[in-house]
Image (spheres, rainbow, N blue to C red):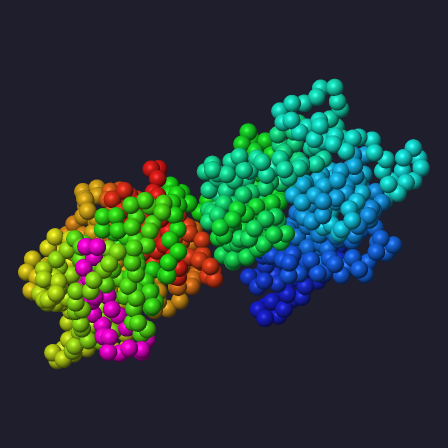
Amino acid sequence: MTTSTPAKERRNDREAALHDLYEEIHQKHLFPFWATTTAVEHDEVRQLVGTSRAVPFLWSYENELASLLRRSAELVTMNDSERRSLILVNPGLAPRRASVTTMYTAYRLNDPHEVMPPHRHTASAVRFGLTGAQNFTGVEGEDITFGPGDLVLTPRDTWHNHGNLGDVPAVNLSVLDLPLVEQLNALSFDHDYAEKGEGKKQQSARFPSDYSARVYGAGGLRPRFLDHRRGAGGSSPMFVYRYDAMREALEKHRDWDGSAHEGLAIEYVDPMTGGPVFKTMTFFMQMLRPGERTLPVKQTSSLLVAPFEGKGHSIVDGKRFDWGAFDTLAVPGGSWFEHANGSDHGVRPAAALRSPRQRRDGTTGMSASVATAERTGERSRNTRLLSQIDCPGGGQVWIDGTTLYISHMRPPAGTSIYDISDPRHPRLLSMIEMPPGWHSHKVRAQNGLMIVNHERLGQENPDLGGGLGIYDVSKPSAPRLITKWRTTGSGVHRYDFDGRYAYISPTAEGYVGNIVLILDLQDPARPQEVGRWWIPGQHAAGGEAYPWDGYVKPRCHHPLRVGDRLYVSYWHHGFFILDISDMARPKLVSGVNSSPAHPHPTHTCLLMPQLLKGRRIMVVADEDVAKLRPSPPAFTWIYDITDERQPMPIATFQVPGIDTDGRPQPPMTGCHQPSERFTGTVLPFAWFAQGLRLVDLADPFAPKEVGFYQPPPPAGYDRASSNDVTLDSRGIAYLTDRQQGTSVVEILKS
């Protein structure tokens, strides 16, 4: 007879054995690469990738570094130390001496007539002059005096020393690949400098002080009678790059378009190869012209940005950093970043420093064990930013001819009107304000008539009341209020307008929530109600039983008219198709509600203008707000309504990559609103934090993204929040952010 061991006892025995196994593995300096549970302490995969990572960070020269450098010069003399530098330590990497994963930056102040003894190291370095005209670095017998903007190389294993030959203090910035070399266990220093076996405290000059300029400064011409291997080799033999030459090159190209992602950028190169000056780092200077803003980009290499002239800001992974001259900004590898010059003067982020990017000829300036800086993705595809309108956050955009109307989310901004004859230079014509307590965040205009909604947004000014403001905009620079159509309750939310009839979603006396109402504006001074429709149960004053206790109250978001049909979104009550061949008596054709099974409200029902694969197709966009429960981002549905009495979902579309695991995400990450004006099969969407997305529905069973524009976050915000988009007759998109600004985006042919 055998006796089995209880399960609890077996489990305890296994846990004890695993504990002993882990102890022995760690004692022998091994790492167990497996997971026994999903807890973090036992998930070795997560532990393996959970090492320290650099974070975006800004060091301010004016506010922090300058005073510390002066104090260090007073307290630490050459008698105390041969070097006196402040190393910038990234908070995410501390206590490692690293500003980003593979490089560090240090600031050095030398007092007048200080010259340090020679030394060498296996890390490569540059010195960039900030202040003082007579910074000094001797490199392998070439004595180099340099000033602001000059770049001096000290390649690996070259003897060099630093100092200041002038009569005033001088500051320079150093960048070394020391963290990379240290990680490769190849770092060494040598301070025992000797010439002919005799130790010396200073190098003897073996080359003329203008050797680099004389031999390599002509560009494209190489003296064949000289040995161009200097020091240990493998680096540029040109040890100094003068700012005068760089400035001249930048100014020559000031009027050129430049790169959308880098502005005007000129790289310092090895005159022998045309490649980077070092195999581990490359250096270039950028010019950002007044008002210029680069498009976001991501790269796998680390980047250090050292502004030299002017002021501006960068956005790194959604966080804004305002910088000035001589600051340093750390941009970790894998981060999205962009730069902007908001001033009236040119800006030079002078030493943008990074590991060399993969070259277009297929070669690379580094070993395979180090990531290249090849772009891993753009934040635009088949689109190009033409201009950016700096305006209050927008709720809706609409175009009539060459006039752009932007309705704003919050008072006092009501509606802005722009001339967009030149989309690169939109011109503000007029603005209508709203008092506190209300907003007019929706707008439509046609044939010289503009209507804006009045909807409650607070408790102030109760006498204003909800409804529609009806304006004469035959002269857009001088809009004139014709009348206000009034309703009770919170007012009107959104609507369609065909030039005569307005199809609106007002609150109304005796009804629960917003309903459908048709207004005739043939005489805009005397709007006339034509007809209305509601879900049975909304008309409380009519004695209808209310069936939704414990659920979200019904609310018409807005109707859209095509022919004798209204396609009506009804928030958490789905959508409805109405027959309005008799406008006075709208009739229900059909309705579908995906809630509460799906937690997002229905925002827009948009009929495609042509048959697709022989089918009548309607796009139904859910809005990524007001979720019934925490959920992944909202998406858009594709319905076949060939038989409009039985709408049938045949596909969905979500922006690729934003919902990878089905976990809940914050509101306004996913879908919001398609453009209600477009042609063809490519439908533009305002996709909240994902910006403008272009979705091709030529095959409605398999919608696919064919382009996008991901705007940067407005100043003071963590991410974009694209609220609406519309197209003009030229196919140019106008994308408004509910927080701040409107982007004018050209849609390119794929």
Can residue 623 be seen in the rendering of this structure?
A: no
Identify the image quadrant of residue 213: top right
**Depicted 459 relative to depicted 623: above or below:** below
**Depicted 160 relative to depicted 470: above or below:** above
Q: Residue at x 64, y 65 (%)?
A: 15
Q: How far across and how far down the image is residue 547, in percent?
A: 20, 76
Quadrant the C terminus occupies = top left
Magenta residue check for 201: no
Q: How far across and how far down the image is residue 85, in percent?
A: 75, 53
The residue closer to the viewer here, 597 or 131, is 131
The residue closer to the viewer here, 324 or 676, is 324
User: Residue 372 vs residue 237: left or right?
Assistant: left
Q: How far across and how far down the image is residue 320, in percent?
A: 52, 57
The residue closer to the viewer here, 416 or 376, is 416
Identify the image quadrant of residue 484: bottom left
Magenta residue check for 466: yes
Q: Residue at x 39, y 51 (%)?
A: 388
**Residue bounds of the magenta highlight:** 453-475
Q: How far across and how far down the image is residue 292, in percent?
A: 47, 47
Query: Which residue is most to the right?
Result: 198
User: Residue 93 vs residue 666: left or right?
Assistant: right
The residue closer to the viewer here, 340 or 190, is 340
Q: Residue at x 57, y 35 (%)?
A: 249
Can residue 153 be seen in the rendering of this structure?
A: yes
Q: Residue at x 32, y 62 (%)?
A: 408
User: Residue 153 vs residue 442: left or right?
Assistant: right
User: Residue 564 vs residue 599: left or right?
Assistant: left
**Depicted 171 relative to depicted 63: above or below:** above
